[in-house]
Image (tube, helix red, strand yellow):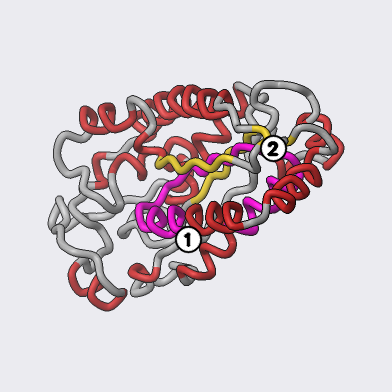
Amino acid sequence: MLIHLSSWPEIDARLKSGDPLAKTVVVPIGSNEQHGPTGLLGTDWLCPEIIAHDLEAQADQLIVAPTFNIGMAQHHLGFPGTITLRPSTFMAAIGDWVSSLNRHGFERIYFLNGHGGNIASIEAAFAEIHAEWSFASPLKQRSAARDAIGDRAAPMGFALKLKNWWDLPGVTALCNSLFPTGHGSHATPSEIAVTQAAYPDRIKTADYSPRIAPTGPIRDAADYRARFPDGRIGSDPAQASPEKGRQIIDVAKAGLLDDVTAFAAERLPALS
C-alpha cells in the first residue's frame, strides 16, 4: 500500500486490520544532488523508492510512505540542480514525519536511506526523538500513545530503524561481484544501474576522463568541486546497465522484505 495513492479510510482500515505489517511503514529517504555527468540528480532518493515500490507491487501488505527526497547535500552545491537542507531543518522534518505517522498508530517506522550524507543527521534526529519521549512524564507518554490508538494497553510509543539500501542482505556482495573495480563511493555504477533499470529512457552517456574518478575527502561545496570536477568519487559509472540494475533491485527487495518483517515482529513494551 502506497500512502500517497490511498485514501484516509483505506489507511485507517489497514491500521486496524491486525495484519503483522499493518503498523509498520517504510519511508524511502535520500537526496537530490549531482551524480556525475550521467547520473540522475534524484538517484539517492530514486534508489530506495524504486526498491520499496517494486516490493510493494508484489507484497501489497507493505505500507510505503511518500519519499523524503531532499536531504543533506551541501557539499554538492557546486553542481547545478542540487538541493539541500540544513542539518537542523532536516532533523526537525524527520521528527515531524515520525510524529505524524505515530499519531495515526504506526508503531514501527523504517527509514530506507539512499544517501550516505544523511546517515549522521538521521541518527541524530532519532536520538532527539528518543530523548524527547524519554524525558516526557509517564502520564504524557500514555496519553500520547492512547491518542493514537484508543483507550487500551498502549505500546511504548514507537520504534525507529535506519537502513541503507546497499546494506540490505546480499546487496554489497552482489555489487562487489558485478563491479570488482571502479565502484567507488559516489556516482557508483550500482546506484546508476538501479535508476537505469527503472528509467531506461533516461540513460545518459559520457566520455569519462579518467575512467575511474579520483578519491579523497569530502568537505564543503567549493572544495568538492575542485577535487572532483565532474562529480564522481572513485567510480566508473560506464559499467552500469539496466540488466545489472534489475539484479540489484531483486536482491535488495528480498532483503528489504526480510528486514521489515523482522522489524515488524519486534515487541514493544506496553504502557500500563
Amino acid under label 1?
A: Gly
Could you say which quadrant of the image residue 243 lies in? top left
Q: Against 132, is 52 above or below?
A: above
Q: Relative to 147, is 225 on the left or the right? A: left
The local secondary structure at tag 1 comes to: loop
Which residue occupies the foreground of this view, 250 or 261?
261
Look at mark 2 in the image and give the residue it sits on: 271
Look at mark 1 in the image and give the residue it sits on: 71
Q: Against 258, is 83 above or below?
A: below
Residue 89 place in picture, x, y as percent: 54, 69
Q: Is residue 250 magenta?
A: no
Residue 45 place in picture, x, y as percent: 48, 50
Residue 239 place in picture, x, y as percent: 24, 40
- Stretch of the chain drawn in magenta: 95-124
Q: Relative to 31, is 139 on the left or the right? A: right
Amino acid under label 2?
A: Leu
The residue lying at 38 percent from left, 73 percent from top is 77
The disc, 2 or 1, on the residue closer to the chain's N-terminal end is 1
Q: Does residue 55 show up?
A: no
The residue lying at 45 percent from left, 46 percent from top is 113
